[in-house]
């Protein structure tokens, strides 16, 4: 990754009739970055990716690719290449012919073409399978052919629209690791569209979370998981316990909040923080609450009653009712100590770290017309 900007998106909006699929999206993506667009179905991810590729023209706004204003350029004049959600590889062509397909218009010599196809197949670990027929390939191999077909064009930016969503879980996880390794090896910018938060967290250098045609937050995986800006971002990226708190005082960079049964906590102030009526929403992740066994003590504890339990093999999800809290608390415990055997109704104590709370801002209202 370098400090150079590869893609700059300035106030891009896209209307379909009166429906606003993209609402003033601005974003910069660096050279060599693995960047993900994450959000629920229909939030505008594909529309944004296709706008970068040149398959859609924004209604307004500009997109610079490698410094070149590009919204009026056709796809083949952009240094981008796209791997589609349904990676349609040609069934009547063999692997090498599939990969060579886009090269035809470059009119390379036979040797140059063969060399580039060979290089691309090697990059996706299909070296030696060039003569294999498309129908003889496994799902993972077809996916790799689709990647090779894009890489052979030597794009500066590879655009991937849910490329792994058709694969089953195990294969998807293997391909995720490969995709990350491939990106680091070829060193070009990857922009991945996904609705799978774990995929985005595991693969990306940075993630943009989108809702309703707007970018809600852009940050590294750790930052976005640990410091989601709004309730919706927090909720989309894993479990979160929400509670309402009352502001006790404000300092330069921090706020002290009365967090109901959790007592007074000091929190970092998010950018642009305001709390007109003195009420704020706080969040704490389920794994930041910890069961206390027997006579184990912790500096900060609460007691409650087990209301529900769900077994997931390696972990158990617990739902714990605490007097004075609006909703039961969600907790996640690994199953090495017997959380999976706790009887419903059991009295339990839990430990928490006051520093694990985050202050959440209001979500902007969504209006798409
Ligand atoms: N060609 C189109 N005509 C009309 N509406 C469209 C078109 N393409 C996408 N949309 C709408 O724009 C919204 C965003 O779509 P899309 O970018 O495909 O979302 P995502 O990829 O996040 O699921 C959706 O509500 C979709 O129905
Ligand atoms: Mg899509």
Image (cartoon, grey):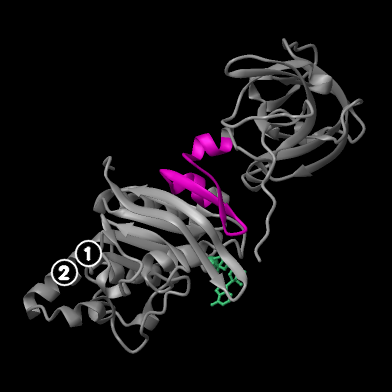
Q: Is residue 216 magenta?
A: yes
- Side of 208 relative to 71 (left or right): right
Mark 2–mark 1 contact, CB under 8 Å? yes
- Side of 87 relative to 327 (left or right): left
Closer to the camera in the image, 241 or 332: 241
Q: Is mark 2 within 8 Å of ligand 2?
A: no
Q: On the image, numbered disc 1 is attached to which residue?
A: 154
Q: Secondary structure at mark 1?
A: loop
Q: Which mark is residue 116?
A: 2
What quarter of the picture does the N terminus occupy?
A: top left
Q: Secondary structure at mark 2?
A: helix
Q: Can I make out residue 175 in this image?
A: no
- Residue 114: % across, % down: 13, 75
Q: Can I make out residue 13 in this image?
A: yes
Say few, some or many: other residues with alpha carbon within 10 Å of mark 1 (under 14 / 14 to 19 / 20 or more).
Answer: some
Q: Give the mark, 2 or 1, whose residue is nearer the N terminus.
A: 2
**Which residue lies at the image location 57% right of the left edge and 54% below the top edge?**
214
Numbered range of the magenta stretch: 199-225
Q: Is mark 1 within 8 Å of ligand 2?
A: no
Spatial CA distance of label 2 from label 1 is: 9 Å
Closer to the camera: disc 2 or disc 1? 1
């Amino acid at each position: 990754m370098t400090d150079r900007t590869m893609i700059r998106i300035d106030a891009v909006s896209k209307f379909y009739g009166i429906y606003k699929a993209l609402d003033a999206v601005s974003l910069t993506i660096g050279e060599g970055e693995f960047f993900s667009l994450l959000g629920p179905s229909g939030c505008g991810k594909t529309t944004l990716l296709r706008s970068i590729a040149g398959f859609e023209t924004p209604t307004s706004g500009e997109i610079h690719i490698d410094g070149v204003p590009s919204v009026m350029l056709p796809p083949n004049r952009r240094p981008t290449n796209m791997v589609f959600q349904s990676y349609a590889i040609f069934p009547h062509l063999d692997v090498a012919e599939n990969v060579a397909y886009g090269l035809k218009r470059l009119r390379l010599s036979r040797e140059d073409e063969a060399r580039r196809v060979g290089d691309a197949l090697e990059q996706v670990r299909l070296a030696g399978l060039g003569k294999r027929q498309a129908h003889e390939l496994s799902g993972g191999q077809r996916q790799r052919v689709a990647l090779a077909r894009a890489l052979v064009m030597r794009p500066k930016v590879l655009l991937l629209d849910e490329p792994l969503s058709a694969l089953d879980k195990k294969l998807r996880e293997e391909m995720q690791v490969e995709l990350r390794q491939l990106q680091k090896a070829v060193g070009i910018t990857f922009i991945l569209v996904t609705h799978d938060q774990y995929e985005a967290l595991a693969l990306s250098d940075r993630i943009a979370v989108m809702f309703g045609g707007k970018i809600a937050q852009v940050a590294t995986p750790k930052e976005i998981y640990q410091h989601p800006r709004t309730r919706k971002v927090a909720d989309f990226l894993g479990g979160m316990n929400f509670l309402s708190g009352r502001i006790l005082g404000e300092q330069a960079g921090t706020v002290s909040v009365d967090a109901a049964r959790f007592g007074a906590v000091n929190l970092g102030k998010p950018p642009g923080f305001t709390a007109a009526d003195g009420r704020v929403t706080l969040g704490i992740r389920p794994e930041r609450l910890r069961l206390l066994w027997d006579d184990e003590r912790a500096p900060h504890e609460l007691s409650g009653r087990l209301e529900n339990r769900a077994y997931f093999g390696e972990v158990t999800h617990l739902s714990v009712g605490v007097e004075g809290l609006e909703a039961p608390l969600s907790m996640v415990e690994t199953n090495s100590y017997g959380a999976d055997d706790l009887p419903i109704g059991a009295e339990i104590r839990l430990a928490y770290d006051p520093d694990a709370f985050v202050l959440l801002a209001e979500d902007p209202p969504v209006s798409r017309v």
